[in-house]
Image (cartoon, rainbow, N blue to C red):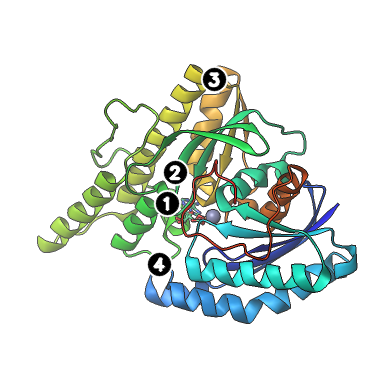
Amino acid sequence: MKILAIESSCDETATAVVEDGRHVLSSVIASQVEEHVLYGGVVPEIASRRHTEAISQITAQALSEANCTMDDIDAVAVTAAPGLIGALLVGVNFAKGLSLRYDKPLVPVHHLRSHIASNYITSPDLKPPFLALVVSGGHTHLVEVKSYTEYKVIGCTRDDAAGECMDKSARTLGLPYPGGKNLDAAAKNGNPDAFKMPHPHVEGAPYDFSFSGLKTFVINTVHNREQKGESISVEDMGASVIKAVVDCLVGNTEKAAIDFGYDKIVFAGGVSANSVLRSRMAACCSEHGWQLFMPTPDLCSDNAAMVGAQGYYEFIAGNTAGLDLNAKATMPINEVF
Ligand code: KG4
Ligand code: ZN
């Protein structure tokens, strides 16, 4: 079964053709990074406009690279929540148009479910149940994935996402957008113990996260130094904040895996590209004899191949939508459209 998939939840316009949820026949991404870099972050209105400009052409490109026409496509899957509402609406409306014109089922996909599904592409043998850590620019969730379409959130952030903490720390240190990736690169040779960072715990909620205090610590420390006319090592501060974030992510994941009895751990979302997070979690899993699954770096950030992967399982479960489908800026992972 071939699915044409569309993703436009943030600043990448992406399309793909995916067969049976696991085989990527084509995957096209039109990145807007160069434009948003001028503003130090994603400007939602610009993102929507660029999606509108790119979507027809990259859909044609994905079909052509997969050697397909719409006649070969069995369903159209689209990210419908959560994300920037104006950006999501571009993809959802385009998918509805294709569904109507070509009489194909319309499959709405939750963005975080699709991030988890990127692992079905990288690891063809992976099957639920497993424990997933979903770390993106806007979300930090520990999720029990009970089946391809059943989820239970056991922990999440109480304030900022891990990606937000990385991005704002990077910006404060003068690194360009996209912050998390540049912070990772800049911190490679830094001393992770150079600063005594806060290690936040949420009282009475051992699987929850809180990253706003860490972000504030970086901002205050950098500003303090600036006011005194002192310099700060970007490498050392970068390495220290990454270590603090990773300590929380790996610590809570390890505790949840032990308490809930999981020996399969899955990473998903943009922050799972972080080199320190990947190596620390790999070490933790090998210590316990657990299996660790991570998407390849190109599948960590937003793409449509993962939407096609999850779209397949949503379709099999009967989770299709009519033309009254609406995009949603927020939506829990365990809800259906
Ligand atoms: O999943 P994603 O592409 O978009 C959202 O759904 O939010 O995640 C983007 C996030 C950003 O916060 C970005 O800075 C972060 O992923 N990110 C990284 C790295 N690469 C991307 N954070 C840390 N280290 C990286 N190597
Ligand atoms: Zn994402």
Cβ at disc 1 under 8 Å from ligand 1: yes
Q: Amino acid at mark 1?
A: Gly
Q: Residue at x 27, y 41 (%)?
A: 194
Figure quadrant of residue 102: bottom right
Vertical arrangement, residue 24 with respect to residue 199, above or below: below
Label located before the other in sequence (4 or 1): 1
Q: Amino acid at mark 2?
A: Thr
Label located before the other in sequence (3 or 2): 2
The front one of 124 and 285 is 124
Task: Kindly give the residue lying farthest to the left in the view shown.
Answer: 228
Q: Amino acid at mark 4?
A: Pro
Residue 110 in the image, given as x and y percentages of width and height: 59, 51
Residue 216 in the image, given as x and y percentages of width and height: 23, 51
Disc number lying in front (3 or 2): 2
Rounded to the nearest angstrom, the CA distance separating label 1 from label 2 is: 8 Å
Q: Viewed as shown, does residue 286 lie left or right of 312?
A: left
Q: Which mark is residue 140?
A: 2
The residue to which callout 3 is attached is 287
Rounded to the nearest angstrom, the CA distance separating label 4 from label 2 is: 23 Å
Vertical arrangement, residue 252 with respect to residue 278, above or below: above
Q: Is there a contact, CB below 8 Å, between mark 1 and mark 2? A: yes
Disc number lying in front (1 or 2): 2
The crowding category of the residue bearing disc 3, from other C-alpha atoms within 10 Å (few below 14, some 14 to 19, many at least 20), is few
Callout count = 4
The crowding category of the residue bearing disc 1, from other C-alpha atoms within 10 Å (few below 14, some 14 to 19, many at least 20), is many
Rounded to the nearest angstrom, the CA distance separating label 4 from label 1 is: 15 Å
Q: Is there a contact, CB below 8 Å, between mark 4 and mark 1? A: no
Label located before the other in sequence (4 or 2): 2
Q: Amino acid at mark 3?
A: Glu
Q: Which mark is residue 69?
A: none
Residue 297 in the image, given as x and y percentages of width and height: 61, 51
The residue to which callout 1 is attached is 163
